[in-house]
Amino acid sequence: MSFLRRYLKFEMKIFIGYILIGCLWILFSDKVVSILFSDAEEITRIQTYKGWIYVMTTGILFYFILRHHIRKLRTAEQMAKESDRLKTLFLQNISHEIRTPMNGIMGFTELLKNETLTEAEKNEFLKIISDSSTLLLNIVNEVLDISMIESGTNKVKISEVSLNNLMDEILNYFTHSVGNDVCIKVEYGLSSGNDVIKADETKIRQILHNLISNAIKFVENGHIRFGYKAKENTLEFFVEDTGIGISKESQKHIFERFFKDRPQNTKIYDGVGLGLAISKGLVELLEGKIWLESEPGKGSIFAFAIPYQKVDDKHEDSISYSGEKARTRQSTFNYLTILLVEDDLPNIKYITEILSRQGIKVITAVNGQQAVDLCHDHQEIELVLMDLKMPVMDGYLSAKEIRELRRDIYIVAQTAYVFNEREKTTVAGFNDFLAKPFNVEQLFAVINRFLERQHQ
């Protein structure tokens, strides 16, 4: 019976049910009537009543069954329409937001071919291309982030974090992003030495980056203030700005995907409309809550609270090193030999150029098997930058064979496939992870983490 319920279609179930009920009704009711009555005229009348009872009973029964089924179909139809609406809205937003920076990249790349340009014009065009490329990458990252949150693949990774160091890093990052008429400042909720907590540093940083970037977009003059406050069981982070503010009606939808507040008589602001939705999703992953206070023309305060997990024994070595601290180790680059495993020629040239300028010796392999052979023949190789999608032998198998040859070698996965790959590489024995495209800072951050481990 369970097999029939699972594999029979709904209409077939109704048909079989109707036939079975009818057969059983006729069989047993006729037997009862033949026992109780003998007069033919009376039996005929009873048979008529039986028919009416059967029709009414099955009619009522099938009405409720069909109503339940149709409600499910209507709900599914509404969900499909809403999904289609969101998909259309998504494509419209993404198409517009991607084409805008692409137009800048393609247009100014073409203009750079003009040999009559001055050095100042070339630098200006290169900056526009760089800014447009960053904007394009941010759009792609936002789409990936919201997809990972909704699919449940974005996991929380707890480590020891110095909140004050994190605030300083964020302040340094945004100091040069604000205009001359905007002041950005930070407030600390704990004294140095007591600011080490257990949390997901990456997600806290990403939430604050999203909120501060949003504030910068809407503040032309005034100030942006961010920081945190320590309460008994929670940490409350905030970003306050003196921007254009948000209307009460828009506040109801501000954390929805693709929603963009469009105040009257203001310019149209860039963005896909995913930053706040991503922030809300990340806060909920951290088992916290996010809210805002705002008034049109008077600015906004975005705040989120997460559980406060103190660290009893604080060890400085367990705290992530900031970019500035990591750069102090760049003087040791000149003895490094790195194996770059990559089959894309532009990427090979790009990474080799970056590393060689810092005095790092670079050996290249264009497939996984060649990488294994080079690690065997060149014992001076200490770090491997391994692309995961490689010909002959993929990055996972190549890393496994290299690990069997060289137990202490530092292997970094680099890939444009970011869905679930970070966790897979950790399980596979990689020491670190670089998501393509990456910039110079991110590349040297990985190298500095390797050097820090060597130092320890």
Image (cartoon, rainbow, N blue to C red):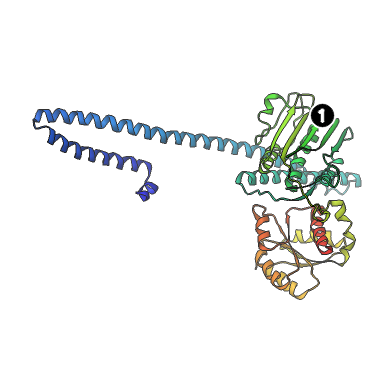
Identify residue type, mark 1: Thr
Residue 223 x, y percent position in the rendering: 85, 32
Instruction: Residue at 13% x, 33% y: name it.
Output: 36
The answer to which of 333 and 39 lies nearer the viewer is: 39
Visible residue check, residue 136: no
Name the side, left or right, on which 167 lies relative to 142.
Answer: right
- Taking the spot 67% from the left edge, 34% from the top edge, the residue there is 255
The crowd level at tag 1 (other Cα within 10 Å; few <14, some 14-19, many 20+) is many
143 or 153, which lies in front? 153
In the rendered image of this protein, does residue 376 appear above or below residue 123?
below
Q: Is residue 279 above or below residue 399?
A: above
Toward which corner of the image does residue 369 lie, by quadrant?
bottom right
| Residue at image mark 1 | 242
x, y percentage for residue 144? 67, 46
Q: Position of residue 386 (x, y in %)?
A: 72, 63
Residue 261 at what x, y percent from top left? 71, 29
Residue 442 showing in the rendered view: yes
In which image quadrant can residue 248 be found? top right
Left or right: where does residue 387 sit relative to residue 68? right
Q: Is residue 66 above or below residue 105?
A: above
Query: Quarter of the image containing the C terminus?
Result: bottom right
Camera-nearest residue between 137 and 226:
226
From this viewpoint, which residue is outermost toward the left? 39
Count of numbered marks: 1
Pick the residue in front: 262 or 157.
157
Task: Identify the element where label 1 is drawn.
Answer: loop
